[in-house]
Image: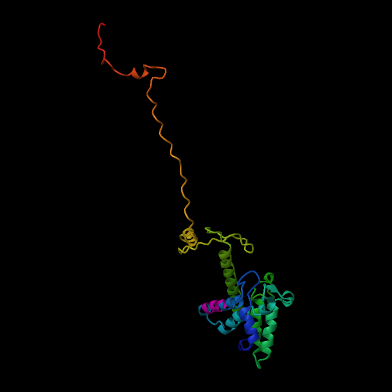
Amino acid sequence: MESFCADTAFLAAYCKAPAAKGMHHVYLGGLLEHSLSVVRLADAVVPLYPDLNRDLLVVGALLHDVGKVAELSYDRAFEYTDEGRLIGHISIGVEMLTERIATIPGFPRELAMLLKHLLLSHHGQYDYGSPKRPKTVEATILHYLDDMDSKINGIRSHIAKDTPQGSRWTGHHRLYNLYFFTGNGNGEDDGLEEAIALSEPMAEAAPEPVVPQKEAPKPPRAGFGNQPFAALQNLSLFGEKESGPF
């Protein structure tokens, strides 16, 4: 690692490069962030399993994707270089590691083999572009930690970018062929719609429409009209007429 870190040109590229073109850590500095995340995961795992070679695992975590500094171009848009398309970051990384080891007199042959195996097998399966499958405990751990960190970053990025406003579900993730639920049961998603509403500028309330009030119908004007005695029909001018023989 000292040989890599002493190379200022390499170190600048290692700190700037993305980790991928479209799957995970797709931003400048993504390679460094991903590599350090795998180192932290390795440090968390090592105490759980006795007799692991921590130094071997940590160096493997730092260098497993080192070939991406040459596989990708990232000065403007992220694209594959000719070397990246024709050789790929795994083979490029092994070449870089071999060149560094060659400058160190007396470097243990078996240790060199184990380091190369970490790089060659970290994709885990032939179908995923891995020239070798993991055949040591450290290589197996590196594969799963690398896979976990890359997937979690990819899923979280998808949640951040492709969750419709006010929804608790993401849009369709093409790679995983899934929709992801954004709630996690710890209360962070409580009041999601309220939080979104509070984050938006409040629109002024529209004035309520003025409904014209209908005038109460006026009682008909008393008058004679064509019935001059109509107004007198209900008047008791002479009191109630007593019933009688007349």
Q: Position of residue 54 (x, y in %)?
A: 56, 83
> Which of the colour schemes (rainbow, by chain, secondary structure, one colour) is used?
rainbow
| Quadrant housing residue 239 | top left
Quadrant holding the C terminus: top left
- Left or right: 197 with respect to 66? left
Counting every numbered tag in the picture gives 0
In the image, 30: left or right of 183?
right
112 or 24: nearer the viewer = 24
Whether residue 136 is visible to the viewer of this picture, yes or no, is no
Which corner quadrant of the image does residue 165 belong to? bottom right
Comparing 108 with 246, the one in front is: 246
Relative to 174, 52 lies left or right: left
Which residue is rendered at x = 70% and y = 74% of the image? 80
Q: Work out whether 57 lies above or below 26.
A: below
Q: Is residue 73 above or below residue 203?
A: below
Q: Which residues are magenta?
A: 37-44
52, above or below 174, in the image: below
Q: Position of residue 3 (x, y in %)?
A: 63, 89
In the image, 201 versus 115, the foreground residue is 201
Q: Is residue 152 above or below residue 228?
A: below
Residue 205 appears at what percent x and percent y?
A: 47, 53
Give the main secondary structure of the magenta stretch. Answer: helix
Q: Residue furthest top?
A: 245
Who is closer to the viewer here, 105 or 171?
A: 171
Q: Is residue 223 magenta?
A: no
Give the percent coordinates (x, y) of residue 82.
74, 76
Quadrant housing the N terminus: bottom right
Q: Is residue 155 in view from this perspective?
A: yes
